[in-house]
Image: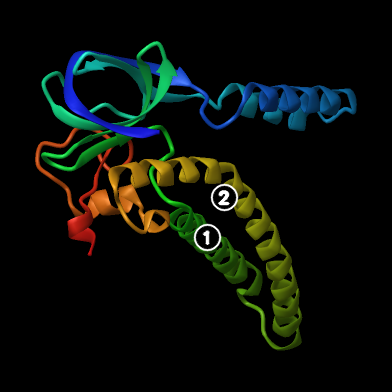
Amino acid sequence: MELIKGTISHLKTQRRRQDFVMSPAQHGYMETTAAGAALMGMGSQAMGLVNISGNSEEEADWVEFELDGKPMRGWVWKMPMSDGDQVEVVAESAGQGRYVVYSIRRPEDSVVATFPHANCGTKALYRRVMKMMIFLFLGIYLILGVIFLHGLSGDDFTEQLHILAIGGSLAFLIFFGLFYISYRKLRGFSLLAEEIFKCYGWSNVEKINLGKSSRKHRPENTLERYGLYYFRYNPAEER
């Protein structure tokens, strides 16, 4: 990938649905697993797998434009730029003078659009996923603790507390496993994000979280989904 600077012209933006997380091969594996589950009489599990496979598409912007005469095209979550904007584009040559776009940044106000899910480094992603796991686990565990221990006393309270502790330990391991799988699934996007950040010349790329930085520094007249689908990042403000 390389950083290309210039002025946007002949911009075309289309809001489309695309599956960015699961590959066609993974869809095939899931559908095969669903068929096997159905044959074994596990109808509800089979339906769940089919629903997951069929509803994994997301909305994003497919953009096509010229940058000082160079044809550019690619996916970004939300396109906040317009014709005439002076921008920096992280792109990869596709041959015949065409480029595949992975990110677009407007230096004037530090607004940046990226490929879907490529908005934070690996360390930032790990912290975000683990924080979600811990908060969700503690919330469920506390609710269950109140339900099971309410009104108990003496030996009954102690026995139920031991059961709750053992169950909580097992549940924590399951939660950790599920969220670690989620982290591994999204890690590829974080590696792409780090390559994008390096092209912009930013440092400590593995710790960058565009969503978090955007919420701290919100400019005026922002579009819908600011901080979720497009961002603002100025390295000078993060020091």
Q: Quadrant of the N terminus?
A: top left
Q: Residue at x 55, y 68 (%)?
A: 142
Q: Is residue 63 visible?
A: no
- Left or right placement of residue 137 versus residue 115 in this view: right
Q: Position of residue 111 (x, y in %)?
A: 20, 39
Residue 221 - label: none
- Amino acid marked by disc 1: Met
Q: Count neighbours of disc 1 (C-alpha within 10 A) and say few if under 14, some if 14 to 19, many if 20 or more.
A: some
Front residue (pair 221, 196): 196
Q: Is residue 124 above or below residue 69?
A: below
The residue furthest right is: 40
Q: Position of residue 196 (x, y in %)?
A: 37, 41
- Amino acid marked by disc 2: Tyr
Label 1 secondary element: helix
Q: Residue at x 75, y 87 (%)?
A: 155
Residue at label 1? 130
Query: Which of the marked residues, 2 or 1, is nearer the chain's N terminus?
Result: 1
Front residue (pair 28, 102): 102
Q: What separation in Å lies between label 2 and label 1 (alpha carbons)?
A: 9 Å
- Where, by quadrant of the figure, is residue 36 drawn? top right
- Where, by quadrant of the figure, is residue 82 drawn? top left
Please report contact status of discs 2 and 1: CB closer than 8 Å, yes or no.
yes
Q: Count neighbours of disc 2 (C-alpha within 10 A) and say few if under 14, some if 14 to 19, many if 20 or more.
A: some
- Left or right placement of residue 29 versus residue 133 in this view: right
Q: Of circles 2 and 1, which is in front?
A: 2
Q: Is residue 80 visible?
A: yes
Q: Residue at x 47, y 53 (%)?
A: 125
Q: Position of residue 218 (x, y in %)?
A: 17, 48
Label 2 secondary element: helix
- Left or right placement of residue 237 versus residue 161 in this view: left
Residue at label 2? 183
Front residue (pair 2, 177): 2
